[in-house]
Amino acid sequence: MPQIDPNPAQHPLLTQNLSLSFGESTVLHDISLAIPKNCLTVLLGPNGSGKSTLLGALSRLNRPSGGIAYLNGKDIASQNTRDIARKLGILPQSPLLPANMTVYDLVSRGRFPHQGLFSHWTARDENAVITALEITGTLEFSNRAVDTLSGGQRQRCFIAMALAQETDIILFDEPTTYLDLRYQVDVMDLIAQLRTQHGRTIVAVLHDLNFALQYADYLVFLKNGRIHQTATSPQDCTAELITEIFETPVTKLIEPVSGLPVFLPLRKQGGL
Ligand code: ADP
Ligand code: MG
């Protein structure tokens, strides 16, 4: 169970009273969130609740209009892009798909932050790329163009690119989108393994609540751009909470092997 300490230096990522606006519209309000080290933090909430925007603020892609985001105890706004990219990798919700680029070249892009202006490709770079290809099961099509792959295969290539970056912190925005059930489990197992075996700090936006409950160390529920509730154990999640967050009636069941709760959406009244 993560220990939450308000001191920025104690956390890989921390926000204090962070708000964020696009033009006139404020989409994040007063977010104070400490991301615990070596844990898998999962952001959950309805569409449009601000999850992707928050990941953007944690990685300096989105500038806050109020409050501060800290990376390793320093205001992220004061850190340069290359320094950030050595500490933090992000897999966006809809990564841009380069035309005619091979899988190998895409994954190699993850090494850019480690290369100086005149430095050459090193054995360490090559090793990081091959390892990332192996872990994600993409080595077999490393010479294919990324845009000829299926959605699920592509997604694994983008995950490989994030892994090749070898950062201590990785942010994933809906990493299991487009994947069939087998690869959803493989990707979630892989993410969990990054945390347990490689000591990484992971923040993931997940749309599948039941996956989130199985894997997360720390759950953060967002609604309307605010933190509605946090939980350090799935057992703290009630049917009332989930119903309130997603505005959909659910019932809570207990999965007999793990003892973890599972939420099943119920048909709304008035249906045919
Ligand atoms: P989520 O990831 O939870 O589905 P987002 O963070 O993508 O939600 O979006 C939160 C809100 O911010 C939404 O209302 C969305 O329309 C708005 N928003 C996101 N990005 C932008 C942008 N670049 N410009 C204007 N509004 C945006
Ligand atoms: Mg999103």
Image (cartoon, rainbow, N blue to C red):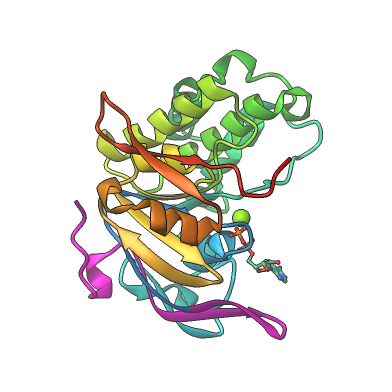
Quadrant of picture, ligand 1? bottom right
Seen at 55% across and 58% down, the residue is: 247
**Residue 67 or residue 134, whichever sits in front:** 67
| Residue 105 in picture, x, y percent from top left | 65, 32
The answer to which quarter of the image holds residue 135 is: top left
The relative height of residue 242 versus residue 260 in the rendered view (above or below) is below
| Residue 195 in picture, x, y percent from top left | 31, 40
| Residue 203 in picture, x, y percent from top left | 42, 52
**Residue 163 or residue 213, whichever sits in front:** 213
Seen at 26% across and 54% down, the residue is: 232
Residue 59 visible to the viewer: no
| Residue 224 in picture, x, y percent from top left | 56, 71
**Residue 119 or residue 101, whichever sits in front:** 101
The answer to which quarter of the image holds residue 61 is: bottom right
The answer to which quarter of the image holds residue 127 is: top left
Q: In this picture, which residue range is highlighted in magenta?
A: 1-29
Which quarter shows the C terminus? Answer: top right
Tell which residue pokes out farthest to the top in this image: 140
